[in-house]
Image (cartoon, rainbow, N blue to C red):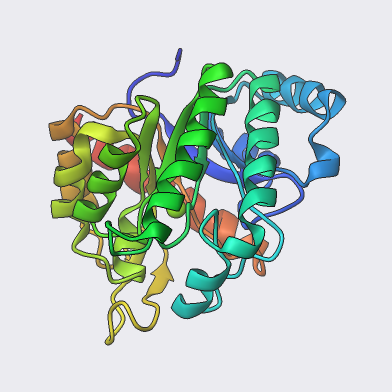
């Protein structure tokens, strides 16, 4: 990667998902992006070529492509359990096939990391259901390996300990973590800084996002808020990233597509905050 340490990044979308459009990154002179995968009809060689041309024109580097599926809903925590990722049985094989296609499209974009929310992994590690999720993850990792890629699991739906056990159980060398401190709070899965220390050896990409705790953690959502306004201690977050040896992009995620102006303003503010902290800490 040609990016300098702790380059600012932003989570973007083309035709799906909640990220900002690429032009926002260009306007704010943000040098790197993660991309939410386009829908199936947008995952063609022509589309990849066009997107790469844009990235080249804007001087932006793509660092990770995130999978996502029709029918997913983050409405509340029980709905997440029923609809997200490769966990729901009814859609599992179709979604595995689609994740493999997303990995192939990511290769066309010259990118070596594919991220996803796997879904809520069953807690009983001796159960048939748990073994099935381990198996489907292995199949995805093996496909990605053919494409010379790593798989990055987004954090939040498991505690740090459960996530490390899961990664160990898959016995795959290309399975890593996209750490999102706000998700730990939103899902009520643990204090983000101790969690980051626990999973540090496997963190290969991160989100810079902020949130406040629910009064019933794990049962109802916390609230996503602008960076610096929530209960993620951003200074401690960056210090801990330095401690674990993470110097990849600081990718801002702010998901309020219903208010594009505010989204852009808050991302600009986040870039300023992160640039200041980087100056102090790096
Ligand atoms: Mg995230």
Q: Is residue 54 above or below residue 258?
A: above
Tell me which corner region of the image, top left, top right, bottom left or bottom right, holds residue 105. top right
Quadrant position of the N terminus in the picture: top left
Image coords of residue 189 (percent x, y)? 26, 66
Tell me which corner region of the image, top left, top right, bottom left or bottom right, holds residue 215. bottom left
Along the line of sight, the residue nearer the viewer: 228 or 209:
209
Residue positioned 19% across, 53% down in the render:
161
Image coords of residue 209 (percent x, y)? 39, 55
Image coords of residue 2 (percent x, y)? 45, 12
Residue positioned 16% across, 49% down in the render:
236
Image coords of residue 118 (percent x, y)? 47, 52
Q: Is residue 144 above or below residue 214?
A: above
Residue positioned 42% across, 60% down in the render:
129
Q: Is residue 59 above or below residue 170?
A: above
Q: In this rendering, does residue 269 appear at all?
A: no
Along the line of sight, the residue nearer the viewer: 37 or 264:
37
Tell me which corner region of the image, top left, top right, bottom left or bottom right, holds residue 249. top left
Along the line of sight, the residue nearer the viewer: 2 or 216:
216
Q: Is residue 269 left or right of residue 31?
A: left
Residue positioned 55% across, 77% down in the render:
75
Q: Is residue 260 left or right of residue 218?
A: right
Q: Is residue 48 left or right of residue 4?
A: right
Quadrant position of the C terminus in the picture: top left
Which residue in the rendered view is the most extreme toward the bottom?
215
Q: Is residue 72 left or right of residue 191?
A: right
Which residue in the rendered view is the most extreme toward the top?
2
């Amino acid at each position: 990667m040609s990016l300098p340490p702790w380059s600012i990044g932003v989570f973007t979308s083309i035709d799906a998902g909640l990220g900002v459009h690429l032009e926002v990154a260009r306007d704010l002179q943000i040098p790197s992006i993660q991309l939410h995968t386009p829908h199936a009809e947008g995952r063609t060689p022509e589309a990849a070529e066009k997107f790469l041309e844009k990235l080249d024109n804007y001087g932006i580097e793509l660092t990770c492509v995130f999978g996502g599926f029709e029918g997913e809903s983050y409405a509340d925590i029980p709905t997440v359990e029923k609809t997200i990722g490769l966990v729901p049985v009814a859609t599992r094989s179709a979604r595995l096939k689609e994740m493999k296609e997303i990995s192939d499209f990511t290769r066309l974009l010259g990118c070596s990391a594919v991220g996803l929310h796997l879904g809520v992994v069953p807690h009983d590690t001796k159960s048939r259901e748990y073994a099935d999720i381990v198996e489907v993850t292995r199949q995805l990792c093996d496909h990605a390996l053919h494409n010379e890629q790593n798989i990055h699991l987004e954090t939040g739906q498991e505690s740090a300990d459960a996530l490390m056990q899961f990664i160990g159980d898959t016995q795959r060398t290309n399975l890593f973590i996209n750490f999102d401190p706000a998700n730990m709070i939103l899902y009520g899965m643990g204090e983000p800084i101790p969690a980051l220390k626990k999973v540090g050896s496997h963190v290969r990409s991160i989100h810079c996002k902020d949130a406040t705790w629910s009064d019933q953690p794990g049962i109802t959502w916390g609230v996503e808020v602008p960076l610096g306004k929530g209960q993620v201690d951003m200074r401690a977050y960056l210090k801990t990233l330095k401690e674990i040896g993470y110097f990849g992009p600081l990718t801002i995620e702010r998901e309020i597509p219903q208010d594009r102006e505010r989204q852009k303003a808050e991302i600009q503010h986040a870039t300023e905050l992160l640039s200041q902290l980087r100056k102090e800490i790096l």
